[in-house]
Amino acid sequence: MELLNISNLCYNYGEDFYLKDIAFSLEHNKSVGLFGPSGSGKSTILRLISGLSKPQSGEILLDGQSIINQESHTRSIGMIFQHHALFPHLNVYDNIAFGLKMQQLDRDNIDIQVNSLLNVFKISKLKNRKISELSVGESQRVAIARSLAPKPKLLLMDEPFSSLDYALKVQLRLEISEILHDMNIASIVVSHDIQDIVPFSDHILLLKDGKMLFDSHLPELYSDPKLKDVGSMLGFFSLKDFLAGIKDLNTIVPDKLKDVDYDHLDFIIHPDNLFVYQKPNPDMFAVECRIEKIFYSGPNPQVILQRVANGDSAFISAIWRENIKPDEVNTVYLCFQNEDLKCLRQN
Ligand code: ADP
Ligand code: MG
């Protein structure tokens, strides 16, 4: 049986924001990512699942039982927030022990479980520290350890990594996903950054303006983002202006869009699929360009390219991967595989 089943969930904040007909399910020990721009309703959905808010209509089943009328703390659902909301008057140990004391476990049992979590989260040395004496990354470890102590069936994580620096984010995402897997705890990860979700699951619920656009998997979304907005959220960008006026482009337009005027089409591509070569690659679509600017945003330089013979002087940026330095080259070719350029009806 599914762990979580949500159907027809609706919620509104006055006239301004409506969450409409949210429906999805989650298997035991699995994870799903709730992905969407700021204001799309992600936190609201987590608040409804955790019991911090009550839906106007719809159903939430956990292990087949409705939890809509159940108090938040009895739902067997853990929740962590972007800002960790630890108890400032308790030390690290007592923060983690809190949920277990609520369950009225005896002291020895609590001690065994808290020490085990301190160990798993590599924070044993911090057990007597005050919350105000922790770094952001340490606080987040404590927050997650605390929410896992009562062994919830489901952990809800609301932008859990957004306040961490890049290196810590990369490390903690992987560590937490491993810990949840080892502890057999299902999770819902909410973020506007797809990289936060990837280590947990490639199953994605895509949300926009309070509606679910897709319940899909990342390989499918990357191969067919369907909408420009979805593409943008996944890192695709438009090549439309850059490619304007190129006749061969017609060969890339799928049959079903052949009759659509260029003005009503868009062409998007993911930066991973763009290449700049000194010679046109015969197996790829190639556009002759000039290098306008070079800057270093990583080990390989970024080059800003201007199309040769484009009256409107459109620019795009791409990674330079040739061995020769880009400033020694005049003419280059922006290349991509036909199937990597996604042709969409403009929305
Ligand atoms: P997300 O987490 O995707 O950024 P939220 O679920 O927090 O989005 O919010 C969705 C929408 O609801 C936003 O437009 C937000 O301004 C609005 N909203 C959130 N909380 C409240 C509230 N307590 N009262 C009124 N509007 C709210
Ligand atoms: Mg939010």
Image (cartoon, helix red, strand yellow):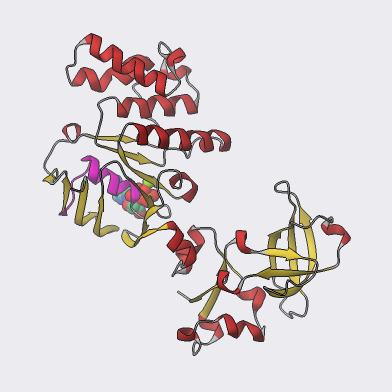
Q: Is residue 80 visible?
A: yes
Q: Which residues are magenta?
A: 42-58
Q: Based on the picture, tell me whether residue 311 belongs to the magenta stretch.
A: no
* Residue in the image at 51% along x and 37% along y: 169
The answer to which of 148 and 53 lies nearer the viewer is 148
Q: Is residue 316 shown left or right of residue 177?
A: right
Residue furthest out toward the right = 328
The answer to which of 326 and 27 lies nearer the viewer is 27
Q: Is residue 236 shown left or right of residue 151?
A: right
Residue 144: x, y in percent?
A: 37, 29
Q: On the image, which quarter does residue 241 sit in?
A: bottom right
* Residue in the image at 48% along x and 68% along y: 228
Q: Based on the picture, tell me whether residue 54 belongs to the magenta stretch.
A: yes
Quadrant where the C terminus is found in the figure:
bottom left
Position of 241 relative to 260 (above/below): above
Residue 45: x, y in percent?
A: 28, 49
The answer to which of 54 and 318 lies nearer the viewer is 318
Residue 35: x, y in percent?
A: 40, 53
* Residue in the image at 18% along x and 46% along y: 54
Position of 177 relative to 247 (above/below): above
Position of 138 relative to 307 (above/below): above
